[in-house]
């Protein structure tokens, strides 16, 4: 086999794996991971069962790979944003916007990601949690740096604040309507503006509320 | 049977139903609704299977009742808060605080509530969605009234804003640690203060952020 044909083979296999992962995310999110079968996945992508098993040894391997993909995307995006943003508040704004956009654009994948964690084998669950901590620490560090630089304080701990921001952002997997005409990027910017408000516009001496 | 013993019988039956519902919420949230069985529920509450079936005709009936209970609690609390609160912003603050507290205090029930909706029969799913709309409309109306009374504007629609607030509040079902020493009421007040910030402290002419 020449190097060229070997590479073409690898590319085709990668494309097949991508198709299997994409179809599996849809199936798992619709019927639940446990209820789904390799038969169903094979039928959805038009592969024979032996061919499907050539790409993934088990349904569990597909689940693990889907979790890895979300964590790879999230952590590498977060690192890149934190490295490039001109200030901690820009890091926070871009990270929250990104998290909303990525979730809206991959809604089925995130339904799975947020709801099927208990189905992961223990070792992979541990890895997912470690990488999620790494992602959350980038947010917490940015909050602390912004507070230190501006003297602004929050009514709560950075951990509660970051979890509040992430809840607001992640919840779009439940309510975003892909046919509603809302742009995921614009939605992300709006949600970021809302949750970062306490860090940008601290309470003045005169309250307008009660 | 005297009226007294009949009432005592009803009370005992109600208590048994409560025990079954409480154990079922734990079991469904831990293993998933589909994977759970009536056998398992009967064993958890120490009832024979015929006795369990005397209280609930099916696993589905238990699921439906659990959803009804959450919606009853949520909608009736929201109505009472809206009727008693002195202003729309107080309604919002108390409602978000309540939603956090109730979720923290019933974490397994809310894991079920937020993740198993697809398992409901169509008619009950319709009812749950209608009642959730009623609850969300109380929030949206309060946002609109507060904006009209104060002249404060938001960078987004009331619907996106309310979904953002609810995401921040509801997400506690994932991260609240009942052994962490955090008080659900205080946590609710903190989350409410964070998400209501844009309605209470509008951006002044000078931004402290970028």
Image: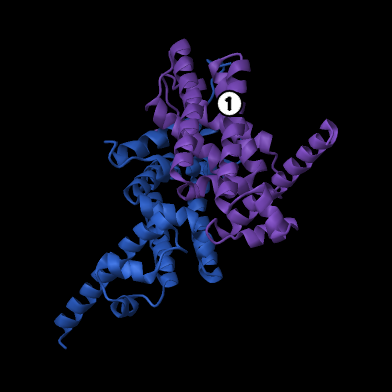
Chain colours: A purple, B blue
Image mark count: 1
Residue B149 visible in image: no
* Closer to us: B147 or B195: B195
- Looking at the image, residue B22 sits to the left or right of residue A19; the answer is left
**Residue at the spot 42% in from the left edge and 22% down from the top edge:** A206
* Closer to us: B163 or B205: B163
Question: Mark 1 packing: few (<14 Cα in 10 Å), some, or many (20+)?
Answer: many
| Residue at image mark 1 | A78
Where residue A120 appears, x then y in whole percent? 48, 47
Name the quadrant of the C terminus of chain B.
top right
Where residue B66 appears, x then y in whole percent? 39, 63
Q: In this rendering, is residue A155 above or below B113?
A: above
**Residue at the spot 35% in from the left edge and 46% down from the top edge:** B104
Name the quadrant of the N terminus of chain B.
bottom left
* Closer to us: A31 or B15: A31
Q: Quadrant of residue B50?
A: bottom left
State the SS at label 1. Answer: helix
Where residue B139 appears, x then y in whole percent? 49, 47
Q: Chain of mark 1?
A: A
Q: In this rendering, is residue B159 above or below A155?
A: below
> Which residue of the protein is positioned furthest toward the top in this rendering?
A149
């Amino acid at each position: 086999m020449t190097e060229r044909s070997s590479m073409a083979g690898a590319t085709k296999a990668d494309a097949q794996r991508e198709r299997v992962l994409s179809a599996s995310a849809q199936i798992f999110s619709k019927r639940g991971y446990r209820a789904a079968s390799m038969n169903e996945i094979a039928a959805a992508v038009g592969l024979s069962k032996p061919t499907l098993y050539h790409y993934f040894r088990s349904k569990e391997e597909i689940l693990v790979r889907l979790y890895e993909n979300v964590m790879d995307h999230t952590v590498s995006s977060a690192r890149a944003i934190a490295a490039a943003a001109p200030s901690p508040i820009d890091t926070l704004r871009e990270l929250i916007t990104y998290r909303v956009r990525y979730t809206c654009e991959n809604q089925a994948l995130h339904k799975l990601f947020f709801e099927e964690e208990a189905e992961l084998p223990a070792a992979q669950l541990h890895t997912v949690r470690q990488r999620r901590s790494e992602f959350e620490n980038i947010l917490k560090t940015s909050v602390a740096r912004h507070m230190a630089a501006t003297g602004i304080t929050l009514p709560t701990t950075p951990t509660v604040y970051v979890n509040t921001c992430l809840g607001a952002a992640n919840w779009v997997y439940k309510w975003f309507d892909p046919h509603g005409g809302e742009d995921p990027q614009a939605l992300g910017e709006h949600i970021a503006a809302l949750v970062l408000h306490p860090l940008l516009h601290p309470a003045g001496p005169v309250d307008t509320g009660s």
